[in-house]
Image (cartoon, helix red, strand yellow):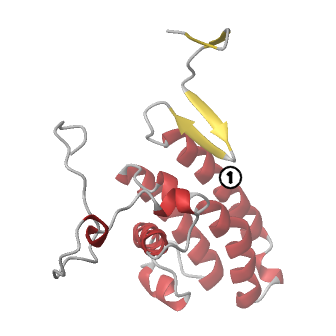
Amino acid sequence: MTINFLNETITPVSFAKDLGMTIDSYLTYDQHITNLVSSCMNSLCQINRVKKCFDKEALTLIVSALVMNKMFYCSTVWSNTSSTNIKKLQLVQNFACRIITNIGKFDHISPGLRELNWLPVKEQLLLREAIMMYKCVNELVPHYLSDLFTKRSDIHQRDTRSHDSLQIPLYKTSAGQ
């Protein structure tokens, strides 16, 4: 299937890369997560080779700068990905935690995550979504984002318990619901 736009033929592709994100035609973000995991694991393997040269604080800074920032880049866009992809990212975070805290391969990772004050990947994604929603509701983001949400108090003037709640649009199709 091809589309003509301004006398130019546009052919569909299976995925496209924009601003460092790989977006596939079904918005599963499988290719993006695969590329992300590969890149992060390569960085972590290199850090692991030289970790004896650094103290724990320096390792934490290095891993945060080179891996965690990359891992959560644009996470509000792809956070609805499959649980399989979330598990892959959790393995990356676990490996990063093991490098910094010297936790053994077969030891439980939770104490290390607590020691570093890191949330598991799934909870980190939920936190980032909650922060974005807070910013949208309180108009701390550009108007093109905050205007996507409507408070019930903007629709009617009755003072009810839910007047600060968001108005959820009604959809008649199952896809919208």
Image check: 171 left or right of 8?
left
Q: Which quarter of the picture shows residue 6?
A: top right
Q: Is residue 126 among what the camera can see?
A: yes
Image check: 157 left or right of 81?
left
Which secondary structure lies at badge 1?
helix
**Residue drawn where x is 22% and y is 68% of the image:** 156
Number of numbered discs visible in the structure rendering:
1
Give the crowd class for mark 1: few <14, some 14-19, many >=20 residues within 10 Å.
some
**Residue drawn where x is 54% and y is 25% of the image:** 14
Whether residue 121 is situated above or below residue 80 in the rendered picture: below
Whether residue 101 is situated above or below residue 142 in the rendered picture: below
Residue 138: x %, y % from top left: 46, 76
Label 1 sits on what residue type?
Ser
Q: Which quarter of the picture shows residue 9?
A: top right
Q: Which part of the image, by quadrant, shows the C terminus?
A: top left
**Residue drawn where x is 40% and y is 53% of the image:** 80
Residue 144: x %, y % from top left: 54, 56
Closer to us: 65 or 94 = 65
**Residue drawn where x is 48% and y is 69% of the image:** 132
Q: Is residue 89 among what the camera can see?
A: no
Residue 99: x %, y % from top left: 64, 76
* Residue under numbered circle 1: 39
Closer to us: 11 or 176 = 176
Q: Residue furthest front?
A: 157
Closer to us: 50 or 69 = 69
